[in-house]
């Protein structure tokens, strides 16, 4: 969905790392989107997405519900955040998946674990181990910055006595394919029946509705 949205706008999307699913699709995937206002627009997709459909892998043709968490982070330089090298566990490994013979025969992929937070990042799209490490550190810096922001917001909620929303319990958007077709954003109520168009990258209506929401207001609409 996001790759098609980016392609329609002439943006470049590069995969940093990927873990295939057991049957199809991905268990997780990390990628970078580069283009005008890419981060500002894609912030609308940050959160948990819920899909309801008849599973093609269920012989009884029953409806199944799946969840996907999308984390949207700005690309920042390693120097923009203080990271203690002693807190890092850096590993090199062979890249998996499509990447050509060179990628699969050399230990060019890099996995970095930030020990205090438990955050793990990996990059395998470059042939150069040095470039993969730089990309992984950039992602780690962005995730650590996001973690700090979440902790600050949580602190503010506790001081105000507000309950913290559960990330997996409050999906931002639902995609229903059966028994009817509807995509609905639960933060602002924007919806459409054209689920095929949305999954093909037609996200502009949802992005616009998100950007029009009052700043600092998180209102979920049932």
Image (tube, grey):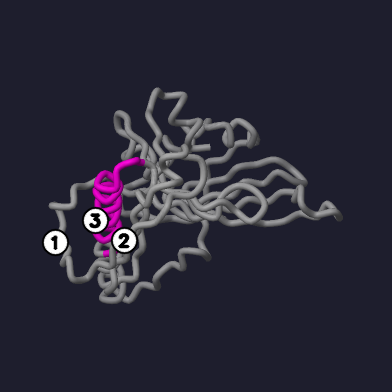
Mark 2 residue element: strand
Q: How many numbered discs?
A: 3
Which residue corresponds to the image point at 18% horizontal and 47% vertical from the top-left? 77
Name which of mark 2 and mark 1 comes first in the sequence: 1
- Distance CA(mark 3)–CA(mark 2): 11 Å
Say the numbered circle drawn on residue 141: 3
The numbered dot on residue 177 is: none
Q: Quadrant of the C terminus?
A: bottom right
Q: Is residue 142 above or below residue 169?
A: above
Q: Residues within 10 Å of mark 3 (few under 14, many from 20)?
A: many
**Closer to us: mark 3 or mark 2?**
2
* In the displayed structure image, the side of residue 76 where residue 176 appears, left or right: right
* Residue 159 visible in this rendered orientation of the protein: yes
At x 39%, y 70%, the residue is 164
SS under mark 1: loop
Rendered residue at 39%/56% (across/down): 93
Q: Nearer the viewer, mark 2 or mark 1?
A: 2
The magenta stretch spans which residues?
126-147
- Residue occupied by mark 2: 112
The residue under label 1 is 82
Q: Determine if the magenta segment contains residue 161.
A: no
Magenta residue check for 141 = yes
Using the image as rendered, state which of residue 221 and residue 85 is in the foreground.
Answer: 85
Measure the C-alpha gap from mark 2 to mark 1.
16 Å
């Amino acid at each position: 969905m996001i790759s098609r949205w980016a392609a329609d706008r002439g943006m470049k999307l590069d995969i940093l790392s990927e873990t295939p699913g057991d049957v199809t699709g991905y268990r997780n995937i990390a990628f970078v989107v580069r283009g005008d206002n890419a981060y500002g627009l894609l912030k609308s997709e940050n959160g948990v997405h819920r899909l309801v459909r008849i599973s093609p892998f269920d012989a009884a043709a029953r409806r199944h519900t799946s969840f996907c968490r999308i984390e949207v982070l700005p690309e920042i330089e390693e120097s923009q955040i203080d990271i203690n090298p002693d807190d890092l566990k850096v590993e090199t490994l062979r890249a998996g998946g499509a990447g050509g013979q060179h990628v699969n025969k050399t230990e060019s992929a890099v996995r970095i674990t930030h020990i205090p937070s438990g955050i793990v990042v990996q990059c395998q799209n470059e042939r150069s181990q040095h470039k993969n490490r730089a990309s992984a550190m950039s992602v780690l810096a962005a995730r650590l910055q996001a973690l700090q922001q979440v902790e600050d917001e949580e602190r503010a909620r506790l001081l105000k006595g507000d309950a913290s929303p559960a990330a997996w319990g409050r999906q931002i958007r639902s995609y229903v394919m059966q028994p009817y077709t509807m995509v609905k954003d639960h933060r602002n109520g924007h919806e459409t029946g054209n689920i095929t168009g949305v999954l093909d990258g037609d996200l502009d209506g949802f992005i616009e509705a998100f950007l029009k929401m009052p700043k600092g207001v998180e209102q979920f609409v049932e």
